[in-house]
Image (cartoon, rainbow, N blue to C red):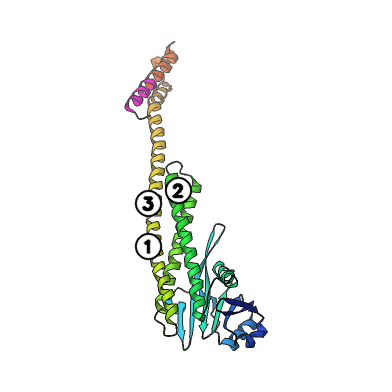
Amino acid sequence: MIKLYVVSGKKVEEREVDEFEKARREGIIWIDVSDPSEREIEWLKKTVNFEMPSKQVMGDIEISSKYIESGNSISINTSFIIQHREEIIAEPVFFFIRERYFVTLHYREIPSLMIFLSRLKAGRTFIRFSESLLAEILNIEVDRIGDRLEILGRRIKNIWKQIFVEQSEELIKDIAYYDELNITLRESINEKTRILSHFLKSPLINAQTKREMRVLFDDLSTLLDYTSFYMEKIDSIQNSLLGLITIRQNEAVKVFTVLAAIFLPATLIASIFGMNFKHMPELEWRYGYPYSLALMFGVTLALLLWVRKKGWL
C-alpha cells in the first residue's frame, strides 16, 4: 500500500497516487510504502528511481547494507523498536532520499512514523528539506528509546529490591526480558550511530539537517552509556539472584544432611537388632524390644540436642 503526502513547511496534505505529477510541483513528496505489491514497486522505480531492497538486505547488519550513497540519492536501512506484549521486535525500515522525494518502506506499523505523521498534521513540525523528514523521524525514535531506557531503569531498581524478598520463576523471566530489551535497544543505538556517522559526512545533506543530526548523534552516545550501565546492573542482579538461590539450596541440603546424620545411629541400632543369627542372646531377651527402642530414642534425642546447641538447626 502506498500513501502519498505533500509536505511544505508546517503544511501536509495527503494525495492520491495518480495525483503525483501535480503534487511534485507543490512541495516535498513523502511516499510511505507498507508491504508493497509488485505493481507498486514498479511504480516507485519508474517514478522516483527507487530500487526495492530484498528482505535479506533489510535484515543485514553490515554497514554497507545500512547506508548507501549513490549519485544524488541516499538509501538507509535501520531498525525501529516495537514492543508487542512480551515480544521485542527490531523492525527494519528502509529510507530513500533523492532531491525532493522521501520514501519510507516497512512491513509493519511503525509507531515513530505514526507519531511523526500526527505531528505533521497538527502543524508542530517545520519541514524545509526532504532529509529533514528523516531527522524528525529519527528524533522521535531516539526519544522513544530514551523513554524506554528511563522506564527500564526504574524497573531494574525495583527488581533489585524484590530479589531479596522472593526468588521466583516469574522474577527470573522478568530479568531475562529486561536483559533482552536492553540488548535490543543497545543494538539499535549502535546501528543508528554508525549510520549517522556516514550521514554527517555526506555532501548531499544541508548544513541545518547536519546540525540536527549531530544533536541526535550526541543523544545516542549518551543513551549508549545508559545501556552499558544497565547491562552491568542486570548482570549484578543476576549474580545476586544466583547467590541467593544457592544459599537457599544450601540451607535445604544442610537440613536434610543434619536430619540424615541424626537418624543414622537409630538406623544402625535397628539394623543390628534386626539381624537373625542363631546365637544372638538378645533374640530370647524379654526386654530386648523396649530396650532397642529406648536406645534409639535416647541416641537420637542426644544428637538432636547437640545439633541444636551447635546452631545447625
Which amino acid type is marked by label 2? Asn
Magenta region, residue range: 300-311
The mark lying in front, picked from 2 and 3, is 2
Real-space CA distance between mark 2 and mark 1, rounded to the nearest whole angstrom: 21 Å
CA neighbours of label 1 inside 10 A, class few (<14), some (14 to 19), many (20+): few
Residue 308: in magenta span? yes
In depth, the one of 214 and 104 nearer the eye is 214
Q: Position of residue 5 (x, y in %)?
A: 61, 78
What residue would you read off at disc 1?
Answer: 225
Work out whether 97 lies above or below 87: below
Q: Quadrant of residue 197?
A: bottom left
Q: Residue at x 39, y 81 (%)?
A: 201
In depth, the one of 123 and 50 nearer the eye is 123
What residue would you read off at disc 2?
Answer: 158
Q: Residue at x 41, y 47 (%)?
A: 241
> In this view of the protein, can residue 182 be seen by the observer?
yes
In depth, the one of 35 and 100 nearer the eye is 100
Q: Position of residue 302 (x, y in %)?
A: 36, 20
The dominant secondary structure in magenta is helix
Real-space CA distance between mark 3 and mark 1, rounded to the nearest whole angstrom: 17 Å
Which amino acid type is marked by label 3? Ser
Which circle's residue, 3 or 1, is located before the other in the chain? 1
What residue would you read off at disc 3?
Answer: 236
Element under label 2?
Answer: helix
Q: Quadrant of residue 32?
A: bottom right
Q: Position of residue 110 (x, y in %)?
A: 56, 68
